[in-house]
Amino acid sequence: MISVLLVGCTPRPVVTLDDARNQLEQSLADYRTCMNANGGDHTCRAERLTMETNQKAYADAMSSGLSTNVVKQSR
């Protein structure tokens, strides 16, 4: 039961540069929505931390040369 609850807390893995960008864009939208609804950063701490984590993941993905497409290799 506990493992099921923790699964929702883990970030999705970044497989492509597109994944990283999409996660960043979604977290930015979530943060802006929270800020607009609550009018203050102190109430949106979780959204801000998620956005900052996704910004770093995107920057890391860009600097590592992660491709925009995943090519599946045949076995």
Image (cartoon, rainbow, N blue to C red):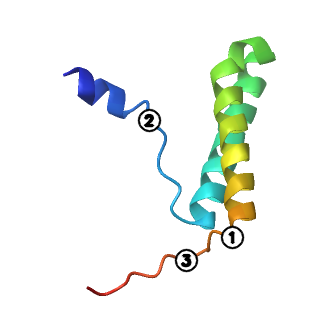
Q: Nearer the viewer, mark 1 or mark 2?
A: 1
The picture quadrant where one finds residue 68 is: bottom right
Q: Earlier in the sequence, mark 3 or mark 2?
A: 2
Q: Amino acid at mark 2?
A: Thr
The one nearer the camera, 56 or 23, is 56
Quarter of the figure with the C terminus: bottom left
Give the class, few, some or many, for how many residues have Cα within 10 Å of label 1's Cα (few <14, many ≥20): few
Q: Earlier in the sequence, mark 1 or mark 2?
A: 2
Query: Which residue is painted at 64% across and 33% down in the image?
Result: 50
Q: Is residue 42 above or below residue 50?
A: above
Mark drawn on residue 19:
none
Is residue 9 left or right of 42 when viewed as pictured? left
Q: Do labels 1 and 2 touch, CB within 8 Å?
A: no
Cα separation between marks 3 and 2: 23 Å
Secondary structure beneath label 2: loop
**Residue 23, horizontal then vertical, whole percent:** 60, 50
Q: Is residue 3 above or below residue 63?
A: above
Mark drawn on residue 69:
3
Query: Which residue is painted at 34% across and 34% down in the image?
Result: 7
Give the class, few, some or many, for how many residues have Cα within 10 Å of label 3's Cα (few <14, many ≥20): few
Q: Amino acid at mark 3?
A: Asn
Cα separation between marks 1 and 2: 24 Å
Q: Amino acid at mark 1?
A: Gly
Query: Which residue is painted at 70% across and 20% down in the image?
Result: 44
- Which residue in the structure is indicated by mark 2? 10
Is residue 70 left or right of 32 when viewed as pictured? left
Mark drawn on residue 65:
1
**Residue 11, horizontal then vertical, whole percent:** 49, 40
